[in-house]
Amino acid sequence: GKRITLGPTTIIKLQRAREWAKDVLADYRATGKDPMEIRKAERAYTLRAYIEERYGPWAESHLKSPDKWLHAIGRYLPDLGDKKLPDITPWLLEKHRSARLKAGVSAATANRNLTALKAALQKAVEWGILKVNPLAGVKRMREDANAVIRYLSADEERRLREALAIGFRRPLPNA
């Protein structure tokens, strides 16, 4: 019940087109997979191509600070850049995130990078490139609410007190 274009009639002869059509039909009967879905998967963007060709130009014109977003997404390109968008899974992301945490990246940084990647993939869903965001269910990591408390050194405290004393001696500007 569907049509498949095999190629232009000026290049493909009728007999060859019939043979290809029989092959496509035989593959469909054997596997049950829609040939058009297979073609779509073959032509799917890789993460790198999607970022460079579609999301990057859009981000440049629509986001307030596109460099930060694209830099955060760029952290995934060494590991996931050659993966096709539908092939990116939560498992691959968790594997990448674990490696980065072992390398010393903080949970907050990993969360910012994840947010940027999820936003980019959500745009792909809005644009019809993906059916669903494969990372929609991935949760952010817990960040330590009790971060290390740092106290001022004696020199820092002295400079702060001097700055405050100078500030109080100045007259207030007229409103």
Image (cartoon, grey):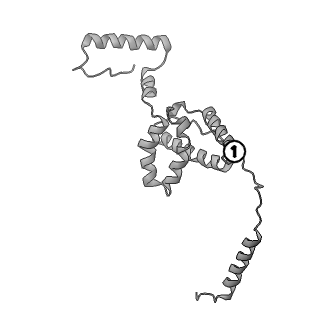
Q: Position of residue 87 (x, y in %)?
A: 54, 30
Residue 114 lies, with reference to residue 152, above or below; the image says above
174 displayed left or right of 2: right
* Quarter of the view holding residue 96: top right
Quarter that holds the C terminus: bottom right
**Which amino acid type corresponds to the residue marked 1 in the rendered image?**
Met
**Any part of residue 18 in sight:** yes
Q: Nearer the viewer, residue 63 or 19?
A: 63
- Residue drawn where x is 45% and y is 31% of the image: 44
- Residue drawn where x is 35% and y is 21% of the image: 4
Q: Nearer the viewer, residue 159 or 109?
A: 159
In the picture as drawn, the residue positioned furthest to the left comes out as 10
Q: Position of residue 6 (x, y in %)?
A: 32, 20
Q: Which residue is mark 1?
A: 141
Residue 157 lies, with reference to residue 106, above or below; the image says below
**Any part of residue 132 in sight:** no
Residue 96 lies, with reference to residue 165, above or below; the image says above
Quarter that holds the N terminus: top left
Kind of element beneath mark 1: loop
88 displayed left or right of 97: left
Q: Nearer the viewer, residue 98 or 143?
A: 98
Q: How many marks?
A: 1
* Quarter of the view holding residue 146: bottom right
